[in-house]
Amino acid sequence: MLMSAAPEHPPPGPPGTSGTPGPLARFLRAFGFAGQGVWQVVRTERNMRVHLAVAAAVIVAGVLYRVSAVDWACLALAIGLVLTAETVNSALETLTDLHTSQHHPLAKTAKDAAAGAVLIASVAAVGVGAAVFWPRVFG
């Protein structure tokens, strides 16, 4: 006997009439969840706080050395890449810890690879910083 599957959520009606939030409210609520995730990483991961301190120093240096718009774009992308890599690393470590509390070689591989991604992003960011600031400081 075939039964049709009921939708998981009823179709939303006009905002404020069905008890379910409208598309805009759901969209904005998603930003809140994302902010909670970022704050969780900032609160619990020392390396994220180190990355944020370095990013703040880079921003101050950029202002003091009056870097160009293109240089700002490069610096912003490098900072964003490092912060994103650290956040993904933290999420992967959390999921791995949720899956197993025992030492497992595959869990170690996953955690090491995620940490390696942060290292690669950080080295690339140092390269961008050197390209932007070396001529200004030592040239």
Image (cartoon, rainbow, N blue to C red):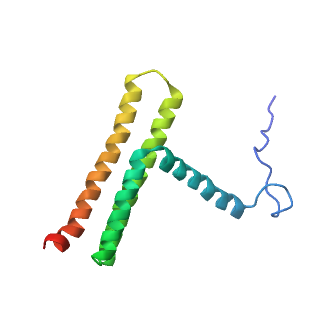
Residue at the limit of the structure toward the left, as seen here: 139
Name the spot of residue 53 as percent of width and height, x first.
Answer: 38, 57
The quarter of the rendered structure image containing the C terminus is bottom left
Looking at the image, residue 12 lies above or below residue 73 = above
**Left or right of 7: which side holds 38?**
left
Q: How many marks?
A: 0
**Left or right of 37: which side holds 68?**
left
Name the spot of residue 28 as percent of width and height, x first.
Answer: 65, 61
Q: Which quadrant of the view contains residue 113?
A: top left
The quarter of the rendered structure image containing the N terminus is top right
* Residue drawn where x is 65% and y is 60% of the image: 27
Q: Which quadrant of the view contains residue 59?
A: bottom left
Name the spot of residue 44 as percent of width and height, x first.
Answer: 49, 44
* Residue drawn where x is 32% and y is 65% of the image: 58
Name the one closer to the observer, 30 or 14: 30
Looking at the image, residue 121 lies above or below residue 67 = above
* Residue drawn where x is 45% and y is 42% of the image: 90
